[in-house]
């Protein structure tokens, strides 16, 4: 049963108050990006229940000072606000199960620290256009799916599964166990992104933070590190554009290889 | 001599008042995106001088009702505001002259109705990274270079010439006379964008409006109309991402062809 967010006490991207947040956690935790709880209300049994539910469902929660509630003063928030997503996130295990029925290879995008929701939306949009199978978003240090992402994606969030994971490192290990190759995009990569053959493997392309790129630990797990060549003394491609260059190179290769195999 | 915009009566992207606008028109008209003039002050000799200067320098001007000045009430605008650009636009003829000294082919991007300044900035950024020679922007029905474009371009506006033109149609004719091939991107294109050989010609890639695509007249002038293949029942790539896919395909081809020719 899906919780109809429209009928709960909410203002767009948020759910306010102990009962509403508890209800949301019970009915569809996969729609919650994170929960913030006022520091001073920690000894409340209702809050304790929320914390337990959040833990069980792997929903991120934080105890925060009252300043963090400054934008919510017009709502009766009772010291608790859940940030919600316009789509249900898919579980990584459910996704991997679903891919077992698939003919052909799987193609996914992993975001590792992309903080601008416009970039997240644009990357989801390109991934959907390119027929990719999923976008993986870590639950921390990356923009979650919210109204801005939905808008920038031009509705693509409803056309491609979005997987939220708490640990990117163990998710990548899981992907590797399931026969995926990990391709990290980095300005210092050895190969150009078009030197990889995208047509004969399951793969996950990792796009990193706008400034810092892919995280160090993720880099260590990568099977390939690819760069996008820069032809002028100006080295700074927008991350959604960089993602598009790589994604559409894989599309080009797939279409070309189908042409040759006919 | 460059006009130092910082020293004139301005607020970021604007210059206010008859004397300041006249001075700017005399010293660097190529830094002015457009001028708006209050309808009721048309019989002023100073305004007449401004109109003459604007005409001579091909700067767009409009007589507008006072509602258009609502955002400028805190400034002493005297019924006239010039919208300025953070960079000097290059003249198309000067650009074509400069390209005659160039070895190898020229590669340019033409924007035809891209109205979101974030997209304009991102396309300029990608064009700079890819070593393109210029970006052409029409003076009407397209976002001009302003502070938002500058920011989204991550400074790229200072690394690639930006050409502003009043008539896209005659500019394209001029490019054709100078041996450029015109490649329009359109969802209904016959060829995939990667079926074009970008390595053996001067070319201009035309990217159209976010919703409507490349204009009808421009389409008629195009030598090639290319599409970006869509692999899911979701057909809506962001225009800056679409531009990036095409631009970087041309980069890929150039690097591959250099490899083979060594």
Image (cartoon, coloured by chain):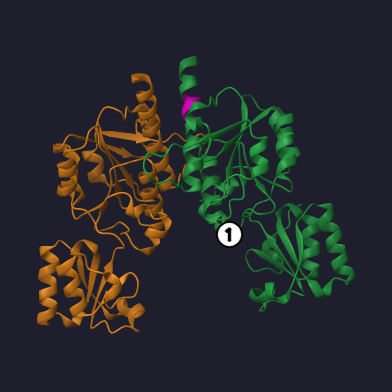
Chain colours: A orange, B green
The front one of A47 and A38 is: A47
Q: Position of residue B232 (x, y in %)?
A: 36, 42
User: Image height check: is A100 above or below B86?
Assistant: above
Region in magenta: B251-255
Pointer 1 residue: B147
How crowded pointer 1 is (Cα within 10 Å; few <14, some 14-19, many 20+) is rated as some
The front one of B128 and A175 is: A175
Residue B57 visible here: yes
Query: Which secondary structure is most common in the magenta stretch?
Result: helix
In which image quadrant can residue A207 be found?
A: top left
Q: Position of residue A36 (x, y in %)?
A: 24, 72
Q: Position of residue B19 (x, y in %)?
A: 81, 68
Query: What element does badge 1 sit on?
Result: helix
Q: Residue at x 69, y 31 (%)?
A: B99
Q: Chain of mark 1?
A: B
Residue B105 visible here: no
The front one of A87 and B216 is: B216
Q: Residue at x 39, y 51 (%)?
A: A210
């Amino acid at each position: 049963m899906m919780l109809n967010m429209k009928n709960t006490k909410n203002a767009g991207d948020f759910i306010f108050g102990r009962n509403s947040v508890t209800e949301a956690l019970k009915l569809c935790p996969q729609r919650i990006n994170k929960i913030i709880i006022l520091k001073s209300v920690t000894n409340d049994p209702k809050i304790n229940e929320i914390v337990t539910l959040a833990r069980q469902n792997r929903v991120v929660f934080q105890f925060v000072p009252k300043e963090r509630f400054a934008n919510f003063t017009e709502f009766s928030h009772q010291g608790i606000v859940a940030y919600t997503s316009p789509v249900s996130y898919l579980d990584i295990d459910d996704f991997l199960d679903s891919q077992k029925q698939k003919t052909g290879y799987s193609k996914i995008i992993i975001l590792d620290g992309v903080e601008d929701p416009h970039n997240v939306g644009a990357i989801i949009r390109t991934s959907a256009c390119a027929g990719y199978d999923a976008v993986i978003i870590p639950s921390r240090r990356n923009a979650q799916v919210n109204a801005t992402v939905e808008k920038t994606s031009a509705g693509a969030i409803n056309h491609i599964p979005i997987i939220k994971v708490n640990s990117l490192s163990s998710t990548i290990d899981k992907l590797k166990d399931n026969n995926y190759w990990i391709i990290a995009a980095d300005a210092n990569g050895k190969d150009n992104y078009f030197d990889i053959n995208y047509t004969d493997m399951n793969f996950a392309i990792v796009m990193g933070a706008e400034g810092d790129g892919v995280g160090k630990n993720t880099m260590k797990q990568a099977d390939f590190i690819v760069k996008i060549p820069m032809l002028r003394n100006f080295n700074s491609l927008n991350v959604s554009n960089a993602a598009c260059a790589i994604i559409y190179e894989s599309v080009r290769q797939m279409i070309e290889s189908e042409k040759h195999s006919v």
